Structure formats: C-alpha cells, structure tokens
Image: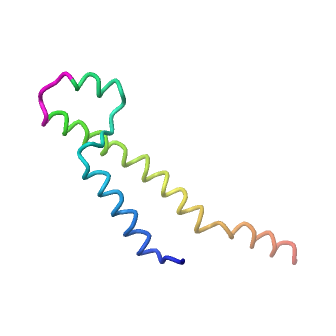
Amino acid sequence: MKYNHRTLLFIVLAIGILLVWNLDTYAQCSMCKAVLSGSNNGKFIRNLNIGVLVLLLPPVSIFCSIFIILRRNRGAGIKEDEESRRI
C-alpha cells in the first residue's frame, strides 16, 4: 500500500493531536510528577504539562529537519561519484 505525502502528514498530525489531547498523558519526568502529585492546583499542573510539551518541540523539529534534508540529498553524493568516474 503506497501513501502520498499528504496522507502520511495527516496521519502523523492526527496521532499527535490525539496524544496531546489525552489528559492522562504527562510529559514529565518521574521526579516532577512526584513533586506535583502533592499539589492540589490543577491549573498549574496542566500548564506545566503543556510547557514541557512546548519545550519538546524545537529538538523534535531540528531532528526531523535533519532527516528531511538527508532524504532530499541522499542520491547527490552517488551521482557526483559516478560523473567523476566517467571523466
């Protein structure tokens, strides 16, 4: 089964939205969760969870950008080697 880029992007975005939407999913380390479990301030805990997810976006974006660049240029080195051998 072959998917086009729009279909894959839609699937990835849908899964991402479902994971973020689920309130039981926490993006905290075990120590942060242990400290906040004693707190009764639900708004603060929710905002901290969102903050952790926001801080996760730049590294994931950089990681994905590197793979996109590598995928676009994956055949460039091989083509240059073949052309230099022909000369």
Residue at image x 46%, y 74%?
5
Classify the position of the N terminus by image quarter.
Answer: bottom right
Residue at image x 26%, y 49%?
22
Residue 21 position, x and y percent, is: 25, 52
> Does 56 sit left or right of 1 as displayed?
left
Residue at image x 31%, y 44%?
53
Q: Within the image, what quadrant is residue 28 found in?
A: top left
Would you say residue 79 sits in the magenta stretch?
A: no
The magenta stretch spans which residues? 38-43
Classify the position of the C terminus by image quarter.
Answer: bottom right
Viewer-proximal residue among 44 and 75 = 44
> Does 56 sit left or right of 68 as displayed?
left
Residue 2 position, x and y percent, is: 53, 78
Residue at image x 30%, y 56%?
18
Residue 85 position, x and y percent, is: 87, 73
Would you say residue 41 sits in the magenta stretch?
A: yes
Q: Within the image, what quadrant is residue 39 found in?
A: top left
